Image (cartoon, rainbow, N blue to C red):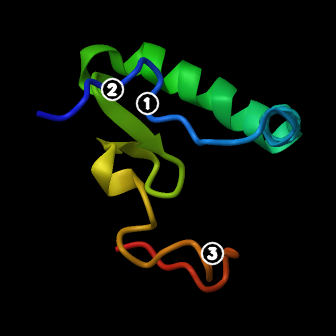
């Protein structure tokens, strides 16, 4: 039987210095204007959607709530070519 997951998901095995640097990088990224805008939009949408949003993520490209699985990796196309011009939605 598999070990139960810890709250917050699996943790990377990093040295204390690497973990501190990653924490700083993550914080800096989360506080960019673009991320703040997306977080605020997500809050507004989630409040408005009510129970329709339960267990789902908001996809900023498709502009709707979709399953978590569907909202990862650009529908199987990966994120390598994601620049705006090369990305096409279904």
Residue 55 shown left or right of residue 22 in the figure: left
Of residues 6 and 39, the one nearer the viewer is: 6
In the drawing, what numbered circle is on residue 9? 1
> Residue at 25% across / 16% down in the picture?
51
Crowding near the residue tagged with mark 3, few <14, some 14–19, many ≥20 C-alpha atoms within 10 Å: few
* Cβ–Cβ under 8 Å for marks 1 and 2: yes
Crowding near the residue tagged with mark 1, few <14, some 14–19, many ≥20 C-alpha atoms within 10 Å: few
Say whether disc 3 or disc 2 marks the residue closer to the N-terminus.
Answer: 2
* Residue topped by disc 3: 82
Say whether disc 3 or disc 1 marks the residue closer to the N-terminus.
Answer: 1
Location of the N terminus by quadrant is top left
> Residue at 82% across / 31% down in the picture?
27
Mark 3 or 2: in front is: 2
User: Residue 66: horizontal and vertical position, in percent?
Assistant: 31, 45
Mark 3 or 1: in front is: 1
> Residue at 34% across / 74% down in the picture?
90
Of residues 26 and 4, the one nearer the viewer is: 4
Crowding near the residue tagged with mark 2, few <14, some 14–19, many ≥20 C-alpha atoms within 10 Å: few
Secondary-structure class at tag 3: loop
User: Residue 72: horizontal and vertical position, in percent?
Assistant: 42, 56
Residue 76 shown left or right of residue 63 in the figure: left
* Cβ–Cβ under 8 Å for marks 3 and 1: no
User: Residue 53: horizontal and vertical position, in percent?
Assistant: 32, 25
Vertically, is 56 above or below 43? below
> Residue at 67% across / 37% down in the picture?
38
Q: Distance between the residues labelled 3 and 2?
A: 31 Å
* Residue topped by disc 2: 5
Vertically, is 31 above or below 82? above
Q: How far apart are marks 3 and 1 (CA)?
A: 26 Å
Secondary-structure class at tag 1: loop
Q: Distance between the residues labelled 1 and 2?
A: 6 Å
């Amino acid at each position: 039987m598999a070990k139960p997951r810890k709250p917050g998901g699996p943790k990377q095995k990093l040295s204390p210095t690497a973990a501190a640097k990653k924490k700083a990088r993550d914080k800096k990224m989360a506080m960019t204007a673009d991320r703040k805008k997306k977080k605020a939009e997500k809050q507004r949408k989630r409040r408005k959607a009510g129970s329709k949003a339960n267990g789902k993520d908001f996809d900023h490209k498709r502009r709707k709530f979709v399953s978590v699985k569907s909202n990862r990796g650009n529908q199987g196309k990966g994120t390598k070519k994601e620049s705006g011009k090369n990305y096409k939605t279904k």
